[in-house]
C-alpha cells in the first residue's frame, strides 16, 4: 500500500497528519493477516491420514523440517521438545521411554514397558528396552500421550512414540550426502556422515531407498 500525504498539511497540522498515517497503517494489518496460511500437518496416529488439529487426543508432532533444522540425531536431542516424555538410558543404543512419568515402579524404571515405541508400523520395544533409531531420513515423529492399547497394543498403557521414515519414491531419482564436522577446545575432532539414495525400478513401479550413516 502506498500512501501520499501533502507536505503542507504536515506543516500546518502535524498531529492530524500523524494520526492519519497511523490509521492508514493499522487499516492494512487485517489484509496482511488474511493472507497468512497455516501449514497443515498430516498424521497417521489413528491408522488413517488426518489433520493433526482434528485428532481427538493429546499428540505432539516433530516434522522433517524440525528434525533437520534443529539437528536432531537421537532421543537425547529431541526429548525436550515433547511434553511429558522422559527416558532412562540403560545401555548404548537402548533406552527406557517413559511418558507422563508412568512406570511400573514408583522409584525405578522396571523392565515392563508402559510406553510403546514404533519404527513405522513395527513395534521395537523389547523387554522394556527400546532401540534408539538414528534420526536420518525421518519424515516425522509422533508422540501420543495416554493409553493407546486399542491401536498399539498393551505396551501403550501410558503412550506411544512413533518414528516414521521417508518412504521410497517410485517417480524420481533422489540422493543426498551430509557431512558434519566438530571440534572441542583442548580436545579431539569428530565428524558425522550420512547419506541417502532413492532409485526407481521396474518402470516406476518399484523403488529402492538406501540410507546409511
Image (spheres, grey):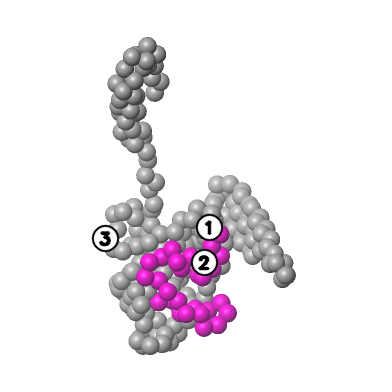
Q: Quadrant of the N terminus?
A: top left
Label 1 to label 3: alpha-carbon separation: 28 Å
Q: Which span is picked out in magenta? A: 70-98
Q: Residues within 10 Å of mark 3 (few under 14, many from 20)?
A: few
Q: Which mark is residue 56?
A: 3
Label 2 to label 3: alpha-carbon separation: 28 Å
Indicate left or right for 181 with 82 as reference.
right
Label 1 to label 2: alpha-carbon separation: 9 Å
User: Which residue is found at the position 61% from the left and 50% from the top?
Assistant: 174
Viewer-nearest residue: 38 or 154: 38
Mark 2 or 3: in front is 2
* Residue placed under numbered mark 2 in the picture: 77
Q: Earlier in the sequence, mark 2 or mark 3?
A: 3
Q: Which mark is residue 70?
A: 1
- Is residue 74 on the magenta stretch? yes
**Residues marked 1 and 2 touching at CB (< 8 Å):** yes
**Residues marked 2 and 3 touching at CB (< 8 Å):** no
Q: Position of residue 138 (x, y in %)?
A: 52, 60
Element type at marker 2? helix
Q: Position of residue 114 (x, y in %)?
A: 37, 79
User: Which residue is found at the position 52% from the left and 73% from the top?
Assistant: 132
User: Which residue is found at the position 65% from the left and 56% from the top?
Assistant: 178
Amino acid at each position: 500500500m502506498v500512501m501520499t500525504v501533502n507536505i503542507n498539511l504536515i506543516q500546518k497540522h502535524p498531529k492530524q497528519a500523524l494520526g492519519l498515517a497511523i490509521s492508514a497503517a493499522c487499516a492494512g494489518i487485517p489484509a496482511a493477516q488474511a493472507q497468512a496460511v497455516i501449514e497443515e500437518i498430516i498424521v497417521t496416529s489413528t491408522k488413517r491420514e488426518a489433520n493433526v488439529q482434528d485428532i481427538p487426543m493429546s499428540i505432539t508432532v516433530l516434522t522433517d523440517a524440525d528434525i533437520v533444522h534443529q539437528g536432531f540425531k537421537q532421543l537425547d536431542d529431541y526429548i525436550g521438545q515433547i511434553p511429558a516424555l522422559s527416558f532412562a538410558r540403560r545401555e548404548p543404543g537402548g533406552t527406557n521411554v517413559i511418558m507422563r512419568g508412568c512406570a511400573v515402579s514408583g522409584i525405578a524404571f522396571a523392565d515392563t514397558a508402559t510406553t510403546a515405541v514404533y519404527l513405522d508400523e513395527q513395534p521395537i520395544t523389547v523387554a522394556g528396552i527400546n532401540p534408539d533409531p538414528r534420526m536420518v531420513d525421518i519424515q516425522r515423529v509422533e508422540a501420543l500421550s495416554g493409553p493407546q492399547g486399542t491401536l498399539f497394543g498393551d505396551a501403550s498403557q501410558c503412550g506411544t512414540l512413533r518414528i516414521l521414515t521417508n518412504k521410497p519414491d517410485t517417480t524420481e531419482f533422489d540422493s543426498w550426502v551430509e557431512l558434519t564436522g566438530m571440534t572441542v577446545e583442548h580436545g579431539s575432532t569428530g565428524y558425522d556422515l550420512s547419506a541417502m539414495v532413492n532409485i526407481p525400478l521396474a518402470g516406476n513401479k518399484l523403488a529402492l531407498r538406501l540410507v546409511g550413516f
